[in-house]
Image (cartoon, rainbow, N blue to C red):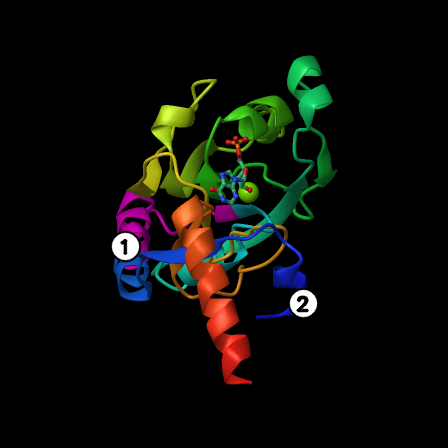
Amino acid sequence: MSDIIESLPPHRVMPFITEEQIQHRVQQLGNQITEDYRDVHRPLLLVGVLKGATIFLADLVRNIARPVEFDFVAISSYGKATRTSGEVRILKDLDASVAGKDVIIVEDILDTGLTLRFSYLMENIRNRHAASVCVCVLLDKPSRRQVPIEVRYCGFQIDNHFVVGYGMDYAEQYRNLPYIGIVDVSENNILAIEETRSAESERI
Ligand code: IMP
Ligand code: MG
């Protein structure tokens, strides 16, 4: 275990959605998008929300069998202050024009919905005369929603777990896992980690 991960509160990552399950579902989503956007003369633009959506977007575009462009935006995450003022800033805007394009916003995970709602990302893209705008998320935690967000494409609906891997992080770690895991901080597991650690040190 690296020093960075050692410095986080004790936790364990439990396997949740396998690499095979993810790849199979991403392929289905790509096929669905290919079918839904059949007019190849209308430009299609996928907009990934940094950083969590990068891996998902990279796999998704390779499963879309028609011309497609992609771009990224960065949105400030809401803290306690922004939650009350309802302000979430767009830190990195789109590079390309969206006028006349069908746009799909690609997110890693939809939780409360506050980031998408208060960044006004969809409104912003619509105001710049996109032909259409919709949302595609790999994971959706519907039980956590605080504001309604219409999701057109969803990989998996999950219960209220904190997940990592396949682009998603815990304190910037674990984005590189090829599968999705649940971060478990329950006491039994922490004890188990400590036992493992002391067993490891006994061996040394
Ligand atoms: P929302 O604004 O509450 O919908 O949260 C959206 C963002 O929070 C996601 O795009 C993620 O970046 C982050 N997030 C929410 N839940 C998780 C999680 O379980 N693991 C990692 N990041 C998460
Ligand atoms: Mg995100």
Instruction: Specify whether residue 60 is in view.
Output: no
In-front residue for pair 60/111: 111
Q: Where is 197 relative to 187, above or below?
A: below
* Nearer the observer, 127 or 40: 127
At x 46% / y 61%, what residue is drawn? 193
Closer to the eye: label 1 or 2 = 2
Label 1 neighbour load within 10 Å: few <14, some 14-19, many 20+: some
In the image, the segment drawn in magenta is 25-46
Res 159 → quadrant: top left
Tally of marks:
2
Q: Residue at x 61, y 24 (%)?
A: 120
Residue 149 position within the rendered picture, expressed as x and y whole percent measured from the top left:
43, 24
Residue type marked 1: Arg
**Between 158 and 91, the one nearer to me in the picture:** 158
Q: Earlier in the sequence, mark 1 or mark 2?
A: 2
Q: How far separated are the C-alphas under marks 1 and 2?
A: 34 Å
Quadrant in the picture for residue 59: bottom left
Residue 57 appears left or right of 150: right
Is residue 173 located in the magenta-colored stretch of the structure? no
One can see residue 30 in this view: yes
Q: Which residue is mark 1?
A: 25
Magenta region includes residue 36 = yes
Residue placed under numbered mark 2 in the picture: 3
Marks 1 and 2 close (CB-CB < 8 Å) = no
Q: 135 or 12: nearer the eye?
A: 12
Q: Is residue 25 above or below residue 199?
A: above
Q: Which SS class for mark 2?
A: helix
Callout 1: SS: helix
Q: Quadrant of the N terminus?
A: bottom right
Residue 148, percent from left and from top? 43, 19
